[in-house]
Image (spheres, coloured by chain):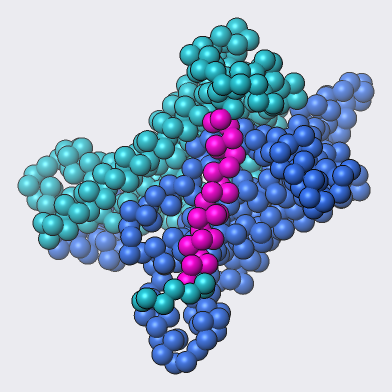
Chain colours: A blue, B cyan
Amino acid sequence: MAFAAFASTTAPTTDAPARRRSKVALLLLLPGILYLVLFFLAPLVSLILTSLQAPSEFGDIGMYSYAFRWENYAAVIEQYWPHILRSFGYALIATVLALAFSYPLAYFIGVTARRWPLLQSLMLVLVIAPFFISFLLRTLAWKQILSDESFLVTSLKAVSLLAPDAHLTGTAFSVIFGLTYNFIPFMTLPLYTTLERLDLRYLEAGNDLYASGFHTFRTVTLPLSMPGIVAGTLLTFIPAAGDYINASRDFLGGADTQMIGNVIEANFLVLLNYPAAAALSLILMTVILVIVGVYVKRAGTEELL
Amino acid sequence: MTRISFGKWLLPLYAALALIFLMVPIVYTFIFSFNDSLKSNITWRGFTLDKWLHVCAVQNGAVCQAFGNSLVIGLVATVIATTLGTMIAIALVRYRFKFRSATSLLLFLPMATPEVVLGAGLAAQFLSLGVPKDMLTIILAHTMFCISFVVVTVKARVAGLDPALEEAGRDLYGSPGQVFARITFPLLLPGILAAALLSFALSFDDFIITNFNSGAVTTFPKYIYISASRGIPAEANVIASAVFILALVLVVTAQVSSAARAKRQAGLG
């Protein structure tokens, strides 16, 4: 019996118990998969159909009929290409900044602090602590810290580090700052996970072979931490590209920092232009999936889930 | 070891500063929960405990109602997503079946899709089916995006589970139900709890998907979004700070108890 269990975990079997087990697998999978089909896949199909809709012939706002208006895509790209480019630009800069910020931090927690497990877990708790406070409130806190009347901005102006008529909020700077801050934990955690498993003997070997610290880092540490870098950059880039809270005018953004998410929200919930919102959503999703696909293939990390 | 160089202290110093930087808006939010503010909570007007003592007093309890909605939605979505996700995780690790890679892809895609797309997609579907947006549509939406995260979290735990333990249960004539209830489930419990906490946290703090599927229902993040233009009362800071402290206590307790368990096991071995 114990032997059969061993066999069933190592190789596929074709005997009767195996067939019964595959029925169990089906029962375990079915409810969840069905749920995702109904509430993830079907909405994507809805989104595709909506993106091709034409305005109703009676001209009512918010009323559309099913059609195959591919022009919808050309129209939104023509109207919103600055928002589309801006979203990916902001997300890319925020991802690079978050990586630069997180790598030394994750290295310290995962490698240097290995001797002190308590300190290590305390620091990890601090890294994820921003998750425990409302995303919107912490973004608003930054808005107030960076606002024109704030202590920080008035001091910077007093010592002439900032021009007297300069603003920090409502600019590309504040939006990218907010995106970077809000997604840092998503970058730090996967980096920590790979660096924590880094075998220090490789670094010693580099040292023994008279490699400089930088050379060892570039040829040993960096390649070994690649899975963490790939996971972290994706976990940061994807939500950052679709985010519309940081760029919203009531938060850190202004009139000319609007991102694709803001436009999707405005078209769907305010202008009731569902086809435009759907077309923009699908453009965003397609670009992200293409980037993810190419990136994962080049970086060579197949098993993401 | 006695040589103290600048380079040696650079990294710890950086890590300390980086962690302080991460704490800045949290501390800010916490401090302003004690602000004796009027309508909006932007300038410091003096210390008070009032907002903590009378959280629900403001705006006929609108903040508390939104908070209550978030709790209910979070709890229901967590229970459903954790159940469905745990079942999938067990199936993925323990069984071989057809369409395995299609299943993995279906689980991976919701995590790789920006929230605004998930939100707009569901809203488009509810719109075309004529489903009115309320509490139920929010719960359906939250459950959907939590499932994948539950699968990833529980899967790691299932993979670390020794199948011989369940086999021993079967050898002792335990029924499949008994084996699951007495062996599999208790061993998976820490992973399941972690997944449930994660999915509650994701649901509780979600704004983007909620905004598309909530209709007139207000959750805590949506309340903040709506109030952002006219000023957020300090009571919102009170609730956020209280949730923060609770979550912190929970996580630290879990860390300490798992460290103690590891120590005990190391002692036994």
Q: Quadrant for residue B131, please give it.
A: top right
Q: Position of residue A263 (x, y in %)?
A: 80, 38
Q: Is residue A43 magenta?
A: no
Q: Is residue A70 left or right of residue B130?
A: right
Front one among A184 and A105? A105
Front one among B49 and B195? B49
Residue under the point 72% across and 58% down: A93
Spot the residue most to the top.
B60
Q: Is residue A133 left or right of residue A68?
A: left
Front one among B193 and A212? A212
User: Is residue A120 visible in the rendered structure shown here?
Assistant: yes
Residue under the point 86% across and 49% down: A163
Q: Quadrant for residue A178, please give it.
A: top right
User: Is residue A77 visible in the rendered structure shown here?
Assistant: no
Q: Is residue B21 magenta?
A: yes
Secondary structure mostly seen in the magenta stretch: helix
**Taking B231 as reference, is B27 above or below it?**
below
Q: Position of residue B226 (x, y in %)?
A: 70, 23
Q: Is residue A189 left or right of residue B58?
A: left
Magenta range? B8-31
Spot the residue most to the left.
B172
**Taking A268 as reference, is A293 above or below it?**
below
Front one among B60 and B35? B35
Q: Position of residue A185 (x, y in %)?
A: 54, 50
Residue under the point 49% across and 37% down: A132
